[in-house]
Image (cartoon, grey):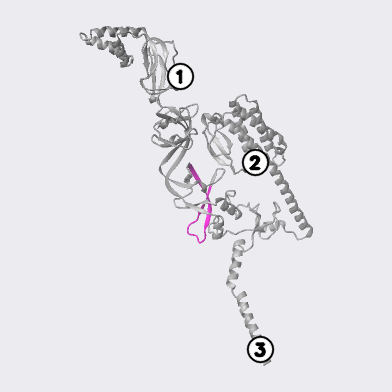
């Protein structure tokens, strides 16, 4: 009996072992799949694990270690080599969601461009009238003697004494006595006074009273505002002398400046809208009714005109306005969103999704762009209608392409030898003797110390440039406002920062080239300090802007909200750039005269 129980216990233990083993080890396919996934993610074409540096992705080797450039620990690199296209970047669904990749189709459509133009409210000259003296005489009184007064049609403006007028009145009275016998003579005498624009009521009064009036009133021929007063009391005037200028402001002209590069984009009948800071929150709309056929030689612009109803008299002559003209292409163009384009110097790059692939695959492609049309670009070459381009997550894709040694912004020719392979790195860094390994460790430690020193130096340079940019923007804003004194005040702080940190700019890493650039900056500052007018200051500001941009480029300075802007008319029509902290154009080279002249070239990122 005991023996039977013993056998039963052993049997139960055996069965339990089989079940547990099946649970723990029976799902061989699942385990194998995970191993394949790990190998697929972190191995190269030869099945070797690939390691890279997060700061220097061009480093790739098949064993862990330290980066030979900065000394950081190498990490396992993701493998994206599964595309038939050597530059194709394959993304897993998880990676695609993590990178928040979005694509948009290339479309063929009418390109609608918004052209921003500066403008000014002007008097509608069709509604402007002159009040003149029709005869020689002397002004006795002025009933309206100040500009801006509103007058009604027929309202008295002034009174005048004239010997000719006295004689004409006497002639009227004499002919009135015989008007039954000689009506023609009477009508001629009366007509003479009417042609001198005496009111009918005044002529009737003279005839009824049978008395000659020594002075008569001059009345307004129209209703409107007195724009100008040209006479004084007791002033002698000649026939035809201008006395008043009256303007009806029930409608006004809006005059806009169109720069040469935009002339071909505007036509009569184009719709436009504009705003003015004097009427916040309101947008006015109209159409172009006149385009000047001649380019203004001094400003290199043409004027366009639009007539606008002036409801409530809110628009005052000489107000500055900012207008937007919508210009449409005559034929459909290939269009892509602006967010799809990566800029690197003269190159324009987009990521195109390859069609009919098992996994999402993207390839960087250089294209040729035309003009910007609102939030889209016209594509001249490099894309076809229906292709899909990445519009969100482009920078993440570009980073992944750099890690995988595929075409990217910074790597236009992948596989050219720029990336160090794992075997080459292994051959150059692996040593069998202990003292050599120790030397490598010491070298890695030195790399870390050098990297920390470089970081500290870079931090000082960044603080220096932060301060320079802040004072520079103060100068720029002062010039936009035509405030010479404020610009000089900002220059003092800018110059102090540039000269105080002079030793930073003589760092041996930068050499003679950077010292030469810094010397030019100091020369530009000195020129601005010697300026005796805002025009001379602006000439020096051109070079200050140029050298500050050079410093930003040389030191790889990054700022989240700085824009490089360009005015083609500055620097004697040679063009000049400046830096702004807003994408809206506010021109420091011309100030309020041409406030919106220019365009945004790029964003400093």
Q: Position of residue 462 (x, y in %)?
A: 67, 42
Q: What is the distance, in whole Å, between disc 1 and disc 3 at their CAs?
A: 127 Å
- Residue 92 shows in this picture: no
Left or right for 159, reference 53: left
The region drawn magenta spans 349-371
Q: What is the distance, in whole Å, between disc 3 and disc 2 at their CAs?
A: 85 Å
Q: Residue furthest left?
A: 181
* Quadrant showing the N terminus: bottom right
Label disc, if present, on residue 265 of the rendered structure: none
Left or right for 561, reference 372: right
Q: Earlier in the sequence, mark 3 or mark 2?
A: 3
Q: Name the residue under label 3.
A: 7
Q: Name the residue under label 1.
A: 146
Left or right for 565, reference 132: right
Which residue is at a point 46% across and 39% down the rendered structure image?
Answer: 114
Q: Name the residue under label 2.
A: 554
Which residue is at a point 43% across and 43% down the rendered structure image?
Answer: 111
Q: Few, some or many C-alpha atoms within 10 Å of disc 2 (few <14, some 14-19, many ≥20)?
A: few
Q: Position of residue 189 (x, y in %)?
A: 28, 10
* Quadrant showing the C terminus: top right
Which sits in the foreground, 283 or 206? Answer: 206
Q: Few, some or many C-alpha atoms within 10 Å of disc 3 (few <14, some 14-19, many ≥20)?
A: few
Does residue 275 sit above or below 61 in this rendering? above
Count of labels in the image: 3
Q: Few, some or many C-alpha atoms within 10 Å of disc 1 (few <14, some 14-19, many ≥20)?
A: few
Label 3 secondary element: helix
Does residue 491 sit above or below 385 in this rendering? above
């Amino acid at each position: 009996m005991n023996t039977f129980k013993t056998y039963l216990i052993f049997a139960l233990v055996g069965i339990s072992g089989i079940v547990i083993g099946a649970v723990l080890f029976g799902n061989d396919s699942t385990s194998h799949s995970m191993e394949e996934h790990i190998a697929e993610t972190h191995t190269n074409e030869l099945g070797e694990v690939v390691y890279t540096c997060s700061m220097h992705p061009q480093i790739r080797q098949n064993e862990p270690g330290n980066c030979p450039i900065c000394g950081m620990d190498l990490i396992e690199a993701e493998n994206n080599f599964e595309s038939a296209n050597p530059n194709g970047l394959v993304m897993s669904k998880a990676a695609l969601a993590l990178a928040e990749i979005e694509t948009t189709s290339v479309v063929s459509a009418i390109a609608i461009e918004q052209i921003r133009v500066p403008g000014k409210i002007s008097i509608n000259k069709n509604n402007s009238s002159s009040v003149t003296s029709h005869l020689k005489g002397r002004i006795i009184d002025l009933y309206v003697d100040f500009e801006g007064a509103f007058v009604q049609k027929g309202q008295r403006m002034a009174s005048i004494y004239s010997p000719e007028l006295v004689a004409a009145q006497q002639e009227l009275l004499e002919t009135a006595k015989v008007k039954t016998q000689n009506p023609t003579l009477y009508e001629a005498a009366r007509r003479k006074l009417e042609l001198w624009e005496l009111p009918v009521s005044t002529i009737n009064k003279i005839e009824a009273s049978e008395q000659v009036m020594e002075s008569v009133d001059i009345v307004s021929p129209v209703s409107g505002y007195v724009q100008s007063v040209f006479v004084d009391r007791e002033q002698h005037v000649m026939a035809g002398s201008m006395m008043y200028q009256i303007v009806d402001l029930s409608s006004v002209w809006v005059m806009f400046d169109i720069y040469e590069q935009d002339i071909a984009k505007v036509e009569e009948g184009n719709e436009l809208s504009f705003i003015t800071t004097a009427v916040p929150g309101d947008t006015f709309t109209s159409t172009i009714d006149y385009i000047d056929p001649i380019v203004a030689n001094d400003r290199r612009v043409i004027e366009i005109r639009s007539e606008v109803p002036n409801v409530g008299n809110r628009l005052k002559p000489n107000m500055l306005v900012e207008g937007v003209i919508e210009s449409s292409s005559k034929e459909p163009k290939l269009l892509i969103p602006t967010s799809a384009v990566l800029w690197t110097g003269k190159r324009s790059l987009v990521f195109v999704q390859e069609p009919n692939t098992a996994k999402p695959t993207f390839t960087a492609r250089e294209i040729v762009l035309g003009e910007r049309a609102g939030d889209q670009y016209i594509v001249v070459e490099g894309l076809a209608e229906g292709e899909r381009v990445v519009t969100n997550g482009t920078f993440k894709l570009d980073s992944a392409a750099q890690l995988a040694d595929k075409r990217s912004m910074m790597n236009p020719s992948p596989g050219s030898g720029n990336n160090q392979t794992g075997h080459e790195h292994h051959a150059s860094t692996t040593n069998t003797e202990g003292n050599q390994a120790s030397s490598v460790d010491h070298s890695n430690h030195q790399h870390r110390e050098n990297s920390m020193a470089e970081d500290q130096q870079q931090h000082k340079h960044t603080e220096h440039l932060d301060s320079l940019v802040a004072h520079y923007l103060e100068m720029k804003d002062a010039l936009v406002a035509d405030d010479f004194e404020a610009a000089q005040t900002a220059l003092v702080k800018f110059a102090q920062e540039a000269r105080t940190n002079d030793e930073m700019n003589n760092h041996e890493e930068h050499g003679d080239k950077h010292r030469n650039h810094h010397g030019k900056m100091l020369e530009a500052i000195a020129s601005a300090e010697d300026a005796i007018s805002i025009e001379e200051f602006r000439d020096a500001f051109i070079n200050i802007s140029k050298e500050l941009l050079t410093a930003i480029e040389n030191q790889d300075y990054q700022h989240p909200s700085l824009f490089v802007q360009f005015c083609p008319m500055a620097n004697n029509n040679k063009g000049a750039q400046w830096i702004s902290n807003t994408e809206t154009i506010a021109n420091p080279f011309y100030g309020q005269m041409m406030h919106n002249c220019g365009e945004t070239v790029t964003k400093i990122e």
